[in-house]
């Protein structure tokens, strides 16, 4: 109870110092940024695994079939890291850096056995070339495939397992 009161007071003090029209997204949506982990802590009741998955799948439906284009950021063509930026920004208001090389350092590392919907999964697909997708549960992840465009693939697929590097949890489900 004490933590809730302190959080509410800190949130009020922060909000009262800003214009009503400039309330940061993370305050409006109940999350708090952790600078050291470079991730948001979003109360569990507002981001249960099912909720994260459904929000991400909504975004997938907007991007499904969009062709892959290295460096692309629009529905005319998009690459894997830009897709992650759009999915996280539009589903849970989480800002990710532009490149896979930067995204791989966000949040905290999780093992493949601990994956939850919303975790980023990373692959080494060539010399100095990384790939990223977002895990949605059931052994599936969403990504921008260079051959299929925006699609869902199986993490257990031999190709993806052979190239798997790590996973990162960027939207922590702990209660702040």
Image (cartoon, grey):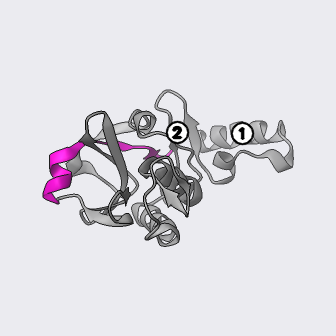
| Horizontal and vertical percent position of residue 121 | 32, 48
**In the shown orientation, is residue 93 left or right of residue 134?**
right
Label of residue 9 in the image? 1
Residue 22 among magenta residues: no
Left or right: residue 143 compared with residue 17: left
Q: Is residue 123 above or below residue 17?
A: below
Is disc 1 placed on a helix, strand or loop?
A: helix
Distance between mark 2 and mark 1 Cα atoms: 30 Å
Residue 173 falls inside the magenta stretch: yes
Mark 2 packing: few (<14 Cα in 10 Å), some, or many (20+)? some
Q: Residue at x 69, y 52 (%)?
A: 28
Seen from the viewer's position, the closer of residues 123 and 92 is 123
Q: Nearer the viewer, mark 2 or mark 1?
A: 2
Secondary structure under the numbered disc 2 in the rendered image: loop
The mark nearer the N terminus, 2 or 1, is 1
Give the residue drawn at x 71%, y 45%.
24
Specify whether residue 172 is in view: no
* For residue 121, above or below residue 103: below
* Residue 25 horizontal/vertical position (percent): 68, 49
Coordinates of residue 71 in the picture (x, y in percent): 49, 46
The residue wearing badge 2 is 97
Residue 107 x %, y %: 42, 37
Residues shaded magenta: 157-175
Q: Is residue 119 visible?
A: yes
Taking the spot 44% from the left edge, 60% from the top edge, the residue there is 48
Tell me the quarter of the picture where residue 143 sits: bottom left
């Amino acid at each position: 109870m004490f933590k809730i009161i302190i959080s509410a007071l800190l949130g009020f003090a922060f909000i009262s110092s800003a214009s009503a029209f400039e309330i940061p997204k993370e305050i409006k949506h109940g999350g708090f940024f952790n600078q050291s982990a470079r991730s948001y802590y979003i109360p569990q009741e507002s981001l249960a695994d099912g909720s994260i998955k459904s929000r991400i799948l909504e975004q997938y439906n907007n991007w499904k079939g969009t062709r892959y284009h290295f460096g692309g950021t629009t529905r005319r063509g998009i690459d894997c890291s830009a897709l992650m930026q759009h999915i996280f920004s539009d589903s849970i208001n989480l800002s990710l850096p532009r490149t896979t090389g930067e995204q791989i350092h966000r949040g905290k590392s999780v093992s493949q056995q601990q994956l939850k919907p919303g975790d980023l999964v990373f692959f080494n697909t060539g010399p100095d070339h990384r790939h990223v997708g977002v895990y949605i549960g059931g052994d599936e992840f969403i990504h921008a495939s260079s051959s299929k465009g925006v699609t869902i693939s199986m993490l257990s697929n031999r190709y993806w397992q052979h190239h798997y590097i790590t996973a990162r949890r960027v939207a922590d489900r702990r209660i702040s």
